Amino acid sequence: MKLGISSYSLQQEMNQGSMSMLDVMDWVKQQGASHVEIVPLHVDLLDTPSLVHDIKEQAKALNLALSNYAIGSNLLQQGDDLRKELDRIKAHVDIAHALGVKNMRFDVGFLSKEESTIIRFNKELPKIVSACQEIADYAKRYPLTVTIENHGYFVQHSDRIITILNQVNRDNFKLTLDVGNFLCADESPLLAVKKCLPYASMIHLKDFYYRETGVALGEGFFETINNNQLRGAVTGHGDIPLRTIIGEIVASDYDGDVSIEFEGIEPCLMATQTALKLMTTYQQLEERSCE
């Protein structure tokens, strides 16, 4: 596994205007990370071709690999709206190729907790599968893997993710595996990672504080599907057994990129730097134990 950083981890700085995507890439390189994941929430790369060029050139200048390009999308639409969305996603596939990344993540869609039932999932499944097949087939023209991620309540459960992956049944369609997001569905991260790891082409190391209470706990906390409370943590400081999970990754056949993804309320530069150091230590310890 190769440890890097998702630009999403520094979203606080980008939201404040104190760092650009190119600044983020500089900072990631300074931390000793092997790659950076491009998550441009603050700008649409379809509208800024010059930034696509600048990101690629900056990566070359820094000798910093671009591991993944992640966009938001919604396949839970109908008719012309869905067709427009599929065409937009495919345009982003072209952007991913222009960047030279190995993976591109798009979203299935987002629903409220109340709407995210298994009945609704089974109803939407044929449309989701068809849409993902179309995107994967389009991406075959490039050396590129397209992925979905376990997030957004509706497809956060490991069984739902695996169902989609198996029914799409494309060699270039895999999973961006977020080890923390299973807690949003109140599912054991360790057990879910064991199930989903064979499908992964990208991994996010994320951590949460998890509290089994129906009482809102205040700033930074949000509800899980079953009305428990979560708050983003510095990766390695929360309640997810990350050293054990890294041990599972190290012992597996997975040899791809792994990104630190921080989404807590702590200062993001400190949090991300701390996380990278700690996850590097965990990786080294687990690799020694496998020797």
Image (cartoon, rainbow, N blue to C red):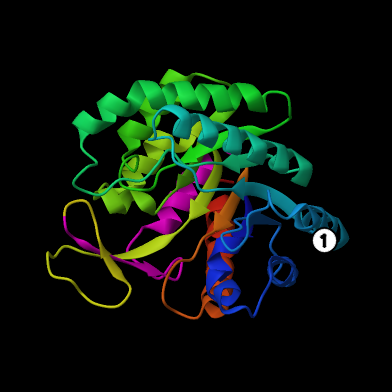
Q: Is residue 53 above or below residue 271?
A: above
**What percent of the width, then of the height, locates residue 50?**
80, 56
* Amino acid type, residue under disc 1 in the picture: Gln
Q: Is residue 63 above or below residue 70?
A: below
Instruction: Give the x, y percent position of residue 230.
Output: 28, 64
Q: In x, y percent, where is residue 155? A: 35, 39
Q: Nearer the viewer, residue 77 or 248?
A: 77
Does the magenta-highlighted stretch encompass residue 243? Answer: yes
- The answer, for residue 196, to whether it is visible in the render is yes
The image quadrant of residue 23 is: bottom right
| Residue under numbered circle 1 | 58
Looking at the image, residue 63 sits to the left or right of residue 87; the answer is right
Categorize mark 1 by other alpha carbons within 10 Å: few (<14), some (14-19), many (20+). some
Residue 270 place in picture, x, y as percent: 55, 79
Task: For mark 1, give the secondary structure.
Answer: helix
Residue 92 falls in image quadrant? top right
Picture residue at 58% right of the left edge, 67% below the top? 276
Answer above or below: position of 176 versus 241: above
Residue at x 54% of width, y 63% of height:
279
Rendering quarter of residue 124: top left
Q: As rendered, which of 38 and 241 lies closer to the eye? A: 38
- At 56% from the left and 43% from the top, the residue drawn is 202
| In-image side of 21 versus 194 (left or right) | right
Q: Which residues are magenta?
A: 227-254
The residue closer to the viewer here, 116 or 170, is: 116
Q: Residue at x 62, y 60 (%)?
A: 43
- Name the side, left or right, on which 141 lies relative to 162: right
Q: Residue 205 lies in magenta, yes or no?
A: no
Residue 1 visible somewhere in the drawing: no
